[in-house]
């Protein structure tokens, strides 16, 4: 409740702060295993953050 009371007037929530931190770390390192260890997230989630942080590295399937 204390954290919510501090950040709510700024328009932030703890979950948005965490998401921002994970995305920032994904921009610094493209290692999904590092994200999984540091933040305790699943492999699929880590890969989604990596793909968002580094869109040029993801392969696009031609239609």
Image (spheres, helix red, strand yellow):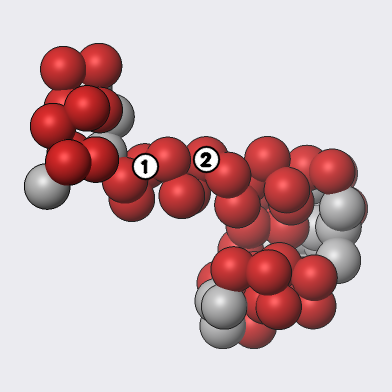
Of the pair 7 and 19, the residue shown nearer to us: 7
Quick check: 58 above or below 54? below
Residue 16 at x, y = what percent? Answer: 36, 42
Q: Residue at x 80, y 70 (%)?
A: 34
Q: Residue at x 84, y 43 (%)?
A: 28
Q: What is the distance, in whole Å, between disc 2 and disc 1 at their CAs?
A: 6 Å
User: Residue at label 2?
Assistant: 20
Q: Residues at badges 2 and 1 in contact (C-beta under 8 Å)?
A: yes
Residue 12 at x, y = what percent? Answer: 28, 29
Q: Residue at x 64, y 83 (%)?
A: 43
- The image's mark for residue 48 is none
For the C terminus, the image quarter is: bottom right
Of the pair 30 and 8, the residue shown nearer to us: 8
- Can see residue 47? no
Question: Which of the 4 quarters of the picture holds residue 59?
Answer: bottom right
Q: Residues within 10 Å of mark 2 (few under 14, many from 20)?
A: few
User: SS of the residue at dot 1?
Assistant: helix
Residue 23 at x, y = what percent? Answer: 62, 46
Question: Which of the 4 quarters of the picture holds residue 39?
Answer: bottom right
- Can see residue 17? yes
Q: Residues within 10 Å of mark 1 (few under 14, many from 20)?
A: few
Residue at the far front: name it: 2
Quick check: 38 above or below 49? below
Quick check: 49 above or below 19? below
Left or right: 16 with respect to 13? Answer: right
- The image's mark for residue 16 is 1
Quick check: 8 above or below 57? above
Residue 53 at x, y = what percent? Answer: 72, 44
User: SS of the residue at dot 2?
Assistant: helix
Left or right: 11 with respect to 28? Answer: left
Q: Residue at x 46, y 49 (%)?
A: 18
């Amino acid at each position: 409740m204390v954290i919510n009371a501090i950040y709510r007037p700024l328009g932030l929530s703890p979950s948005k702060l965490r998401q921002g931190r994970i995305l920032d770390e994904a921009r610094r390192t493209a290692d999904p295993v590092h994200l999984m260890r540091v933040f305790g997230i699943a492999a699929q989630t880590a890969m989604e953050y990596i793909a968002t942080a580094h869109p040029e590295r993801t392969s696009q399937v031609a239609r």
